[in-house]
């Protein structure tokens, strides 16, 4: 038999166990998704729609925090250095795989980020000022060849931006001379074309389709792999004979390295379920954005292939030196 003191000790131990809360299951408080760009752009919109749907599925709010600066470097570094506890994630763009090719002394390494899943793509659209006598790639290239040794002007959102990759792809595919005019953002580049200060640029579908439909810009092609669901009359560059001119403004989800695998897998599962929902598609597709469901392995395969493809182009074009 247990003596009085022994029985008392057992009672105290059992009471202590009952009073100790069970280990909380993830998530038990709000989650941050860091957008490394300012509000209002394609990545920000994609993030907010996906965050709302994923938060409902997880039972905790997913809060968007905009941390723009240095071509997405600032926000990316925040996530790379964050505690890997499943409460901080990055809404990435192409810069997450190209910045290390183009920039020196990054405050993080690529290996400090863990891929979680692709979210969506805002297809890139090549646009010109309406006064340009071209409505497709054949006419655009033919017109550019008549513009003298300096060629045409092309607006980018800075070195390594998606418009920068598009113009380098066009130069490689056609040989036409193009003078690059860098701006602080894609919106500034589009405004330069609207004012006819620059002849052409490319930008996310969500940004330019309203201007195209209003007649303020003329669309030449989409550089996405398929036609845009909300603007199906616009042919792709591949359909027009330029399969090498291919890129989109994609958004994916990353976590800090060492985030527990069960959390990564759960977040991917809830993200993919959200992307397949009619609620999310109804908010994204009409604005020109295509959802991009897939597994973690699908996302890794995509980014690995893009890193190799874009890295070869960046090196050949010496993009890091521009």
Image: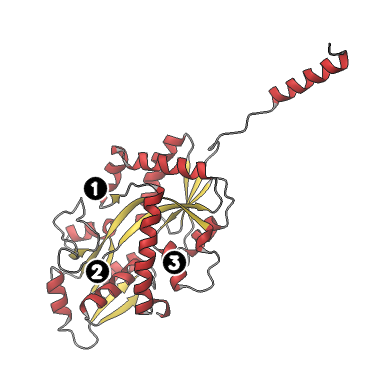
Measure how far apart labels 1 and 2 are at the Cα level: 27 Å
Question: In terms of secondary structure, where does tag 1 sit?
Answer: helix
- For residue 151, what is the image quadrant? bottom left
How crowded pointer 2 is (Cα within 10 Å; few <14, some 14-19, many 20+) is rated as: some
Left or right: 255, with 239 as reference point = right
Of the image marks 2 and 3, the number of the one nearer the N terminus: 3
Of the image marks 1 and 2, the number of the one nearer the N terminus: 2
Q: Residue at x 31, y 69 (%)?
A: 163
Q: Which residue is drawn at 34% across and 43% down?
A: 275
Q: Are marks 1 and 3 in contact (CB under 8 Å)?
A: no
Question: In terms of secondary structure, where does tag 2 sit?
Answer: loop
Asked whether residue 132 appears in the rendered view, the answer is no
Question: In terms of secondary structure, where does tag 3 sit?
Answer: loop
- For residue 150, what is the image quadrant? bottom left
Kindly identify which residue carries mark 3: 71
Kindly identify which residue carries mark 1: 286
| Quadrant where the C terminus is found in the figure | bottom left
Q: Position of residue 156 (x, y in %)?
A: 33, 71
Mark drawn on residue 62: none
Q: Residue at x 78, y 17 (%)?
A: 11
Q: Position of residue 46 (x, y in %)?
A: 36, 50
Give the residue at the far front of this rendering. 1
- For residue 320, what is the image quadrant? bottom left
How crowded pointer 3 is (Cα within 10 Å; few <14, some 14-19, many 20+) is rated as: many
Decide: is 112 above or below 6: below
Kindly identify which residue carries mark 2: 244
Decide: is 187 above or below 291: below
Q: Which of marks 2 and 3 is in front?
A: 2
Measure how far apart labels 1 and 3 are at the Cα level: 28 Å
Q: Position of residue 221 (x, y in %)?
A: 19, 64
């Amino acid at each position: 038999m247990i003596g009085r003191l022994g029985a008392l000790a057992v009672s105290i131990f059992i009471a202590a166990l009952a009073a100790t809360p069970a280990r909380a299951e993830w998530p038990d408080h709000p989650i941050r998704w860091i957008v490394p760009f300012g509000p209002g752009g394609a990545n920000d919109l994609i993030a907010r729609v996906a965050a709302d749907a994923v938060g409902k599925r997880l039972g905790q709010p997913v809060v968007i925090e905009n941390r723009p600066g240095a071509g997405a470097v600032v926000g990316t570094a925040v996530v790379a250095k964050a505690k890997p506890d499943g409460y901080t994630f990055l809404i990435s763009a192409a810069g997450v795989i190209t910045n290390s090719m183009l920039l020196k002394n990054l405050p993080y390494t690529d290996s400090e980020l863990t891929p979680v899943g692709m979210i969506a793509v805002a297809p890139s659209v090549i646009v010109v000022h309406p006064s340009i006598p071209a409505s497709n790639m054949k006419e655009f290239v033919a017109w550019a060849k008549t513009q003298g040794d300096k060629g045409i002007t092309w607006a980018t959102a800075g070195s390594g931006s998606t418009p920068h990759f598009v113009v380098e792809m066009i130069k490689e595919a056609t040989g036409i001379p193009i003078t690059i005019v860098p701006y602080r953002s894609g919106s500034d580049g589009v405004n330069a074309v609207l004012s006819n200060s620059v002849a052409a640029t490319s930008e996310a579908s969500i940004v330019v389709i309203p201007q195209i439909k209003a007649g303020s810009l003329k669309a030449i092609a989409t550089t996405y792999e398929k036609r845009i669901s909300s603007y199906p009359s616009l042919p792709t560059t591949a359909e027009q004979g330029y399969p090498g001119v291919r890129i989109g403004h994609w958004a994916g989800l990353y976590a800090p390295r060492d985030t527990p695998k069960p959390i990564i897998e759960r977040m991917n599962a809830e993200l993919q379920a959200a992307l397949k929902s009619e609620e999310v598609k109804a908010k994204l597709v009409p604005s020109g954005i295509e959802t991009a469901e897939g597994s973690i392995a699908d996302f890794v395969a995509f980014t690995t292939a893009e890193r190799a493809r874009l890295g070869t182009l960046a090196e050949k074009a010496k993009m890091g030196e521009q």
